[in-house]
Image (cartoon, helix red, strand yellow):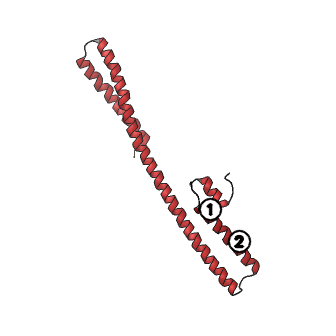
C-alpha cells in the first residue's frame, strides 16, 4: 500500500513532469518571439506554483483529516476500554465487599485482615474515581490518577 507521503510526492512528481513537458510544447507551437516566450514561461511557472500549491493543500488536508479521524477513533476505543475496566473493577470491588461482609458476619477473618481488606478496597475505589474524573486524556494524567502521584 502506498503511504501518504509517497502519494503526495508522486503526485507532485508526475504533475510537474507532465506540466513542464506539455506546457513547453504548447508555448513552442504558438509563440515565435523569444521575449514573449520568456514572459509566458514566467507566467507558466507562477501558474505551476499556484496549481501545485492548491493540489498539495487538498492532498495534505485529505490525509490530515484521515489522521484526525483515526485519532478520534483511537480515543473513543480508549475511553470505551477505560469504562469497561472501571466497570469490571467496580464489580470486583463490590464482590470483595460482599465477601468481607459475609466473612465478618461469620467471623471467618481476623480483625487485622478485615482492616487491611477495607484499606485495599477503599484505595482501589479512590483510584477508579480519579481515573473516571480525568478530563484530558494523556499518559501523565492517567499515571497521576492511577498512582496518586505527580507524573515523572
Residue farthest to the right, as pictured:
112
Looking at the image, is mark 1 or mark 2 earlier in the sequence?
Answer: 2
Label annotation for residue 130 = 1
Residue 61 in view here: yes
Q: Which residue is mark 2?
A: 119
Residue 55, image quadrant = top left
Where is residue 124? Give x, y as percent: 65, 68
Considering only vertical position in the picture, is 98 above or below 142? below
Residue farthest to the left, as pictured:
30
Which residue corresponds to the image point at 42% horizontal and 40% vertical from the top-left?
60
Where is residue 93? Give x, y as percent: 62, 73
Label 2, secondary structure: give it: helix
Q: Is residue 12 left or right of residue 116?
A: left
Considering only vertical position in the picture, is 66 above or below 144? above
Which residue corresponds to the image point at 64% horizontal and 61% vertical from the top-left?
146
Label annotation for residue 151 = none
Amino acid at each position: 500500500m502506498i503511504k501518504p507521503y509517497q502519494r503526495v510526492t508522486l503526485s507532485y512528481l508526475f504533475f510537474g513532469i507532465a506540466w513542464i513537458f506539455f506546457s513547453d510544447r504548447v508555448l513552442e507551437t504558438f509563440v515565435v518571439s523569444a521575449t514573449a516566450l520568456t514572459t509566458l514561461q514566467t507566467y507558466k511557472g507562477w501558474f505551476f506554483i499556484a496549481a501545485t500549491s492548491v493540489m498539495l493543500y487538498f492532498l495534505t488536508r485529505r490525509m490530515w483529516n484521515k489522521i484526525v479521524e483515526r485519532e478520534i477513533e483511537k480515543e473513543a476505543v480508549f475511553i470505551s476500554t477505560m469504562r469497561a475496566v472501571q466497570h469490571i473493577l467496580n464489580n470486583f470491588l463490590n464482590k470483595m465487599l460482599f465477601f468481607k461482609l459475609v466473612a465478618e458476619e461469620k467471623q471467618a477473618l481476623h480483625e487485622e485482615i478485615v482492616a487491611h481488606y477495607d484499606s485495599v478496597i477503599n484505595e482501589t475505589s479512590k483510584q477508579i474515581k480519579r481515573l473516571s474524573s480525568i478530563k484530558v486524556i494523556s499518559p501523565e494524567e492517567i499515571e497521576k490518577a492511577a498512582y496518586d502521584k505527580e507524573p515523572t
